[in-house]
Image (spheres, helix red, strand yellow):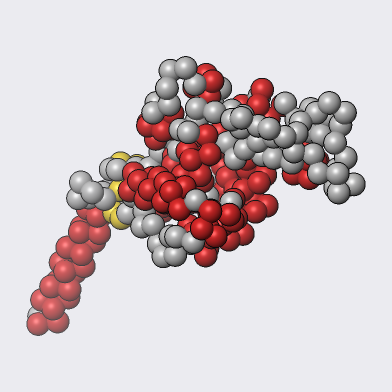
Amino acid sequence: MALTQISLIILLSLLGFYSETIMSQNCNCAPNLCCSQFGYCGTSMDHCGASQCRSGPCRGSETPTGADLVGSIVTQGFFNGIINQAGNGCAGKSFYSRDSFINATNTFPNFANTVTRREIATMFAHFTFETGHFCYIEELRATSNFCSLTSSQYPCAPGKSYYGRGPFLLSWNFNYGPCGQSLGLDLLRQPELVSSNPIVAFRAALWFWMKSMRPVLNQGFGATIRAINSLECNGGNLGAVNARIGYYRDYCRQLGVDPGANITC
């Protein structure tokens, strides 16, 4: 008789546990938890991912990559906050756009798949300084054709000038040549493509970024200033250095990231 009572107690306990398990599997989750496809509550991608989530704060997609990742950082509001500070008479206001930047990143998958908010803050701080909030497409008051006769590998085309164009003001034939080769364009013969096609302009800027600036990104913002203009870092223009740093701090704040160490050069 005692054995029967003990067995009954164990059975009732198991039924209670089973009932609680079924309840959790049926997803009586707290409002901040997702219900997985198997009926469990949680916040991981196994619970909240687009293909696994039944209810709750499901995520619209898996971890974004490519254009989705870039677009999630460079929102239209972020981009407008920069370009809207340019004057109405600026040529860049009808040239540069968020879409042209995102489209340009499609040809640099290594960048598009791994870019961070701090990297975007760094890049756009330099874009802002170089172009005056995306006002300028070409270098102001260019007094030279920027043709280096010592660059025999990338000879200048007759009648062409290689002054600064685009978001990073790409300059000199020894930059236009390899940049064009990388992009599949003949920028030695058609350097004006960088200032007439906004996607090419951003692609040229991304080429320079990947070649000269991303390799020093982990050294801090100051190292990227030196990479784009070492003269500023050598006392040539303290005002320019401070302006770049000011933009960088502002964009880090907007994007919700810490500026990190070694901000100045």
Q: Nearer the viewer, residue 6 or 86?
A: 86
Task: Give x and y (percent) for residue 130.
Answer: 53, 39
* Residue 20 occupies quadrant: bottom left
Q: Residue at x 84, y 26 (%)?
A: 159
* Image quarter of residue 21: bottom left
Q: Is residue 195 visible?
A: yes
Q: Is residue 106 visible to the viewer in this orientation of the structure?
A: no
Decide if residue 123 is on the left or right side of residue 56.
right
Report x, y in % for residue 248. 41, 49
**Relative vertical location of residue 87 with respect to residue 5 in this rendering, above or below:** above
- Left or right of 191 in this view: 213: left
Q: Nearer the viewer, residue 205 or 20?
A: 205
Q: Answer left or right for 193 relative to 60.
A: right
In the rendered image, the vertical position of residue 194 relative to residue 36, given as above or below: above
Q: Quadrant of the N terminus?
A: bottom left
* Number of numbered markers: 0
Residue positioned most to the bottom:
2
- Front residue of 44 and 203: 203
- Residue 177, percent from left and from top: 80, 41
Residue under the image location 86 percent in, 31 percent down = 157
Asked which quadrant contains residue 12, the reply is bottom left
The residue lying at 43 percent from left, 26 percent from top is 86
Position above or below: 178 against 198: below
